[in-house]
Image (tube, rainbow, N blue to C red):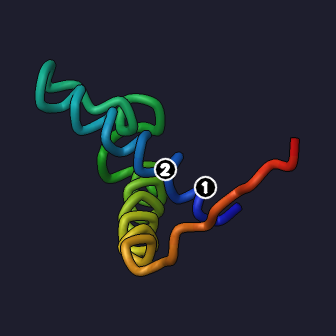
Amino acid sequence: MLDKIALFLLIVGGLNWGLVGLFEFDLVSFLFGGQTAALSRIVYVLVAVSAIWCISLFFKENELVSSET
């Protein structure tokens, strides 16, 4: 479950960076009151922690899901 949350936050961060790169529009700061607003900073930190967490996914064994039919 934690992997999925981290992946979701990375997708949000990636989309936000895409908007910044293409349109110079920071959606996170727009929604939460500017880049220095407490909520914006929390979101930025959560995205960064998620990226650090997802580094561990490189070292996990692939989990095989088999279905019995």
Q: Which mark is residue 9?
A: 2
Does residue 52 lie above or below 7 as drawn?
below
Does residue 35 lie above or below 19 as drawn?
below
Q: How many marks?
A: 2
* Mark 1 surroundings within 10 Å by alpha-carbon count, few (fewer than 14), some (14 through 19), many (20 or more): few
Which residue lies most toward the top here?
Answer: 23
Horizontal relation, residue 5 to residue 54: left or right = right
Label 1 and label 2: CA atoms lie apart by 6 Å
| Residue denoted by label 1 | 5
Element on which disc 2 rests: helix
Residue 36 location (% of width, % of height) = 32, 53
Tell me which amino acid carries mark 1. Answer: Ile
Using the image as rendered, state which of residue 55 and residue 30 is in the foreground.
55
Using the image as rendered, state which of residue 9 and residue 24 is in the foreground.
9
* Mark 2 surroundings within 10 Å by alpha-carbon count, few (fewer than 14), some (14 through 19), many (20 or more): many
Using the image as rendered, state which of residue 2 and residue 13 is in the foreground.
2
Element on which disc 1 rests: helix
Q: Quadrant of residue 54?
A: bottom left
Name the residue at 41% across, 50% down: 10
Name the residue at 31% across, 35% down: 16
Name the residue at 71% across, 61% down: 1
Using the image as rendered, state which of residue 55 and residue 27 is in the foreground.
55
| Disc 1 and disc 2 in contact, CB within 8 angstroms | yes
Residue 6 location (% of width, % of height) = 52, 59
Q: Quadrant of residue 52?
A: bottom left
Does residue 30 lie above or below 39 as drawn?
above
Horizontal relation, residue 20 to residue 10: left or right = left
Name the residue at 45% across, 64% down: 50
Tell me which amino acid carries mark 2. Answer: Leu
Residue 55 location (% of width, % of height) = 36, 73
